Amino acid sequence: MKKHPKLVFEPRFRIRCGGQLVFGPGKANLLEHIQKTGSIVDAAKAMNMSYMRAWTLVKNMNDSQNKSLVETTRGGRLRGGAKLTKTGLAVLQAYRKIETQSMTATRLAQIKIADMLSS
Amino acid sequence: MKKHPKLVFEPRFRIRCGGQLVFGPGKANLLEHIQKTGSIVDAAKAMNMSYMRAWTLVKNMNDSQNKSLVETTRGGRLRGGAKLTKTGLAVLQAYRKIETQSMTATRLAQIKIADMLSS
């Protein structure tokens, strides 16, 4: 019997609209970093992501639905900042809730899979 | 207000062991197609996936944990076939249960996100 570390389950909910990917784990993490750092540049750095990629994801989040999720401010000494809109924060919180709830609800099936694979 | 189609939520649970991805939505679909077609070749075709890619995923599923999930048979007129092991079938079923349970448990938060984005 091989020894192996513990299995880790990660919910990675995707939200689609038509064929388009509207929201998912990457965008949730980006929102969280923007919330923490107050800046798309710094959020991108924290995620080892190019600024262009982060900017594209933000634009995509703001344009794909009726509500913007990130608000940017320009000018001043600090190259402009970014923060979550009220909707952006609420969507992030609801998404994290989905992750927590799905982990709790599936605990037994997770244990079953882990037992089957490791025994 | 933009009109847009309904939001669709997809749980895409990943199972990791150490740094390695052990199981996820793609492997679950591959197991399901192997179960249906009795063949890795046909499962790969049904998923628009190269045979080499499918074979690598099967090898990875069989080697990464203590139990094999797919059993292959060689020779005969039909280039050999493949079927799920008892563990493979049970893992697939438990994974589908995780998907169903997580969708049910998060229905309210899903509605909340859909309402926030579309209103």
Image (spheres, coloured by chain):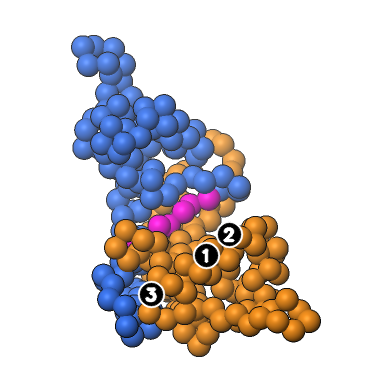
Chain colours: A orange, B blue
Label 3 neighbourhood size at 10 Å, few (<14), some (14-19), many (20+)? many
Q: Is residue B13 covered in magenta?
A: yes
Q: Chain of mark 3?
A: A
Q: Amino acid at mark 1?
A: Leu
Q: With respect to residue B78, does B15 lie above or below?
A: below
Q: Residue at x 57, y 52 (%)?
A: A6
Apparent side of residue A12 relative to residue A16 in the rendered image (left or right): right
Residue B59, picture quadrant? top left
Q: Amino acid at mark 3?
A: Gln
Asked whether the residues under the numbered discs 2 and 1 touch, taking CB atoms below 8 Å apart as contact, a structural biologist would say yes
Which portion, as a residue range, is magenta? B10-16
**Mark closest to the chain's N terminus, 3 or 1:** 1
Label 2 neighbourhood size at 10 Å, few (<14), some (14-19), many (20+)? few
In percent of width and height, residue A11 lies at 45, 62
Mark 3 — residue? A65
Apparent side of residue B71 relative to residue A54 in the rendered image (left or right): left
Residue A99 is tagged as none
For the N terminus of chain A, the quadrant is top right
**Mark closest to the chain's N terminus, 3 or 2:** 2
Q: Which one is in front, B102 or B8?
A: B8
